[in-house]
């Protein structure tokens, strides 16, 4: 069966109405499920700790947010859009010098965005306030804005900080905040919305994507909401209300009439039962990976309304719900690129640079700050087709030291060499070239490869030092509970690797295949059967080689 077809079959979870009845359970599998979905994965020690805590205390720990978060400070590098090219900024500069200044300014701004995103990814890798960061990522896909359109890292960073402040707090406050968010107002053209010439882009997405969903408003409502938000704009990177541009005439939105402004409209939307249902449906589907039944949506929507749109009580109830741990949900969601890479890192115990994961996720189809559309990323099974089937495994190979990023670049464009990987717009400063421990495995050379522009993410990867700081031998020994000179069978070693690297139990056929693979390579490498794990200089390369094969399987993309 082809890789994509196999992945679809593995991820084909049942719809909730036909799902198996939930069973009260709390074991390693359900604990790992919680840590995968509510965070970004965990290693065996963290999973064991969660099992020991019990479900209630493990869930409560997710909401214990560290109040001492220190976000990096970034000054506003990019000049105001309205000042770009002005005589004040460029007085006396020759044309070529002016162009060079503008180019450098754009590059500095993109680098600032990259630096901030690496900080964000490093928090995911470290597991710091994991649920808050998970919800920050969710809001980034719900209230989308794109650097490509906003063209300013300052506004994009401030929006991300807004999401983090309200990650587990009040959706009401977040909605009012996003309506005043400069990145959003620029992205959806509300910065040009004025009386007599209303722009409907923000109004339409506010109704369709952010609050009510399709079918719960009319075209007349869109027009009236646009009028209510006239004058809500941006100046010097900050929200500005221009009273001269605001339409103060009477408006009628969803049956409510009066001299409505933007805040009035937001409260009208929040008072609609469809708003709570829309948000609940999206949140439950995001965390479970399958569409919830209408009965379940209604039950959680009532809770959301009763809590005045506080997000934490809703998620606490969801994570304590036995239905969250039912069989058609456990290990059946296709991992996003961020989930796949960050989860793999956390299972391996590796410590790669944030830039490697940032660029790798973008190459796999999830480029933070660059959503594909106003709807964000489709997620789910769409991730199967976001990149070539082999690429996720190759990225895992880089994390393991089995694949060199430079070889991926050569697979993309055979004549690639080190000089091609110099600084590129929006990428990172050059660093050490990636080299593989134990010689590495060269990425396959696709026959269709020809001279073409190398993606900026791949150019960035080619200069990331990828000498993984991990010890698979030690992890296998710990999982098998053997000491430094203890013996373990080839099948047991393969089983330990599968348990470590996969979020779903391996089929018996796969376990047998991997056991045979370990035995064959051990013999080929002339590693003695007795106490071979004690010879880590021999065992480690073999374990990484088999781990690379496991992480290239379609099962590795489920969590």
Image (cartoon, helix red, strand yellow):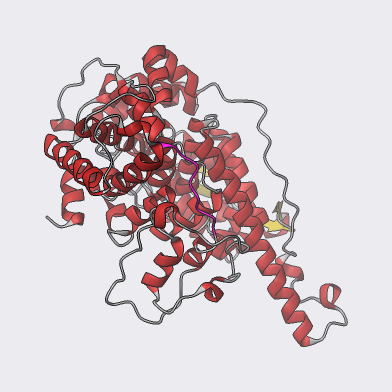
Q: Is residue 466 magenta?
A: yes
Residue 535 is left or right of residue 10, and the answer is right
Quadrant for the N terminus, please: bottom left
Quadrant for the C terminus, please: top left
Q: Is residue 342 above or below residue 419?
A: above
Residue 350 is left or right of residue 6, and the answer is right
Q: Is residue 43 magenta?
A: no
Q: Is residue 198 above or below residue 303?
A: below
Count of all numbered marks drawn on residues in the image: 0
Give the camera-side residue of 31 and 24: 31
Residue at the bottom extreme?
95
**Which residue is depicted at the point 60% across and 65% down?**
196
Q: Tell me which corner region of the image, top left, top right, bottom left or bottom right, holds residue 382.
A: bottom left
Give the camera-side residue of 426 and 441: 441
Q: Which residues are magenta?
A: 464-472
Give the camera-side residue of 122 and 483: 483
Give the camera-side residue of 495 and 19: 495
**Which residue is depicted at the point 26% across and 33% down?**
493
**Secondary structure mainly formed by the magenta segment:** loop
Residue 187 drawn at (x, y percent): 55, 59
Q: Is residue 335 above or below residue 190?
A: above
Asked whether residue 385 is in view, the answer is: yes
**Which residue is depicted at the point 61% across and 41% down?**
162
Residue at the right extreme?
92
Asked whether residue 218 is in view, the answer is: no
Residue 82 drawn at (x, y percent): 73, 69
Residue 499 drawn at (x, y percent): 28, 32
Residue 325 drawn at (x, y percent): 27, 25
Q: Tell me which corner region of the image, top left, top right, bottom left or bottom right, holds residue 191.
A: bottom right
């Amino acid at each position: 069966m082809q890789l994509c077809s196999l992945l679809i079959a593995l991820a084909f979870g049942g719809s909730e109405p036909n799902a198996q009845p939930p069973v009260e359970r709390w074991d390693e599998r359900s604990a790992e499920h919680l840590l995968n979905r509510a965070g970004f994965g965990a290693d065996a020690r963290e999973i064991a700790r969660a099992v020991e805590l019990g479900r209630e205390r493990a869930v409560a720990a997710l909401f214990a947010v560290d109040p001492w978060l220190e976000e990096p400070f970034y000054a506003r590098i990019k000049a105001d859009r309205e000042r770009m090219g002005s005589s004040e900024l460029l007085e006396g500069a020759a044309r070529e010098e002016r162009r060079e200044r503008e180019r450098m300014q754009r590059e500095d701004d993109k680098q600032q965005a990259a630096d901030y995103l690496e900080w964000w990814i490093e928090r995911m890798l470290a597991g710091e306030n994991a649920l808050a960061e998970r919800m920050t990522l969710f809001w980034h896909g719900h209230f989308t804005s794109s650097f490509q359109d906003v063209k300013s890292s300052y506004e994009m960073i401030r929006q991300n900080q807004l999401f983090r402040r309200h990650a587990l707090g009040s959706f009401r406050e977040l909605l009012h905040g996003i309506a005043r968010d400069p990145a959003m107002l620029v992205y959806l053209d509300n910065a040009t919305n004025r009386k007599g010439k209303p722009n409907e882009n923000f109004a339409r997405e506010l109704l369709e994507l952010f609050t009510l969903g399709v079918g719960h408003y009319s075209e007349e409502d869109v027009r009236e909401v646009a009028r209510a938000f006239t004058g809500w704009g941006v100046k010097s990177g900050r929200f500005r209300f221009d009273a001269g541009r605001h339409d103060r005439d009477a408006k009628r939105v969803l049956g409510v009439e009066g001299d409505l402004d933007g805040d009035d409209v937001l409260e009208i939307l929040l008072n609609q039962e469809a708003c709570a249902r829309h948000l609940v449906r999206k949140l439950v589907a995001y965390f479970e990976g399958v569409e919830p039944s209408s009965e379940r949506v209604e039950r959680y929507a009532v809770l959301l309304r009763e809590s005045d749109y506080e997000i934490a009580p809703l998620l606490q109830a969801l994570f304590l719900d036995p239905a969250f741990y039912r069989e058609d949900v456990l290990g059946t969601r296709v991992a996003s690129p961020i989930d796949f890479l960050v989860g793999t890192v956390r299972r391996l115990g590796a410590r790669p640079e944030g830039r490697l994961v940032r660029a790798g996720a973008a190459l796999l189809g999830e480029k933070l700050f660059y959503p594909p559309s106003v709807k964000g990323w489709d997620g789910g099974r769409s991730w199967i087709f976001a990149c070539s089937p082999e690429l996720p495994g190759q990225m895992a190979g880089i994390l393991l030291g089995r694949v060199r990023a430079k070889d991926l670049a050569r697979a993309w464009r055979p004549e690639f060499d080190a000089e091609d990987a110099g600084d590129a717009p929006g990428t990172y400063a050059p660093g050490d070239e990636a080299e593989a421990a134990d010689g590495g495995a060269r990425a396959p050379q696709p026959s269709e490869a020809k001279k073409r522009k190398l993606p900026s993410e791949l150019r960035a990867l080619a200069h990331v030092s990828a000498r993984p700081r991990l010890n698979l031998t030690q992890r296998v020994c710990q999982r098998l509970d053997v000491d430094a000179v203890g013996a373990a069978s080839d099948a047991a070693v393969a089983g330990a690797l599968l348990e470590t690297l996969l979020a779903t139990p391996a089929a018996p056929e796969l376990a047998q295949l991997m056991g045979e693979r370990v035995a064959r390579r051990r013999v080929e490498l002339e590693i003695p059967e007795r106490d071979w794990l004690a010879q880590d200089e021999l065992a480690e390369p073999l374990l990484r080689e088999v781990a690379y094969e496991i992480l290239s399987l379609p099962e590795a993309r489920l969590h």
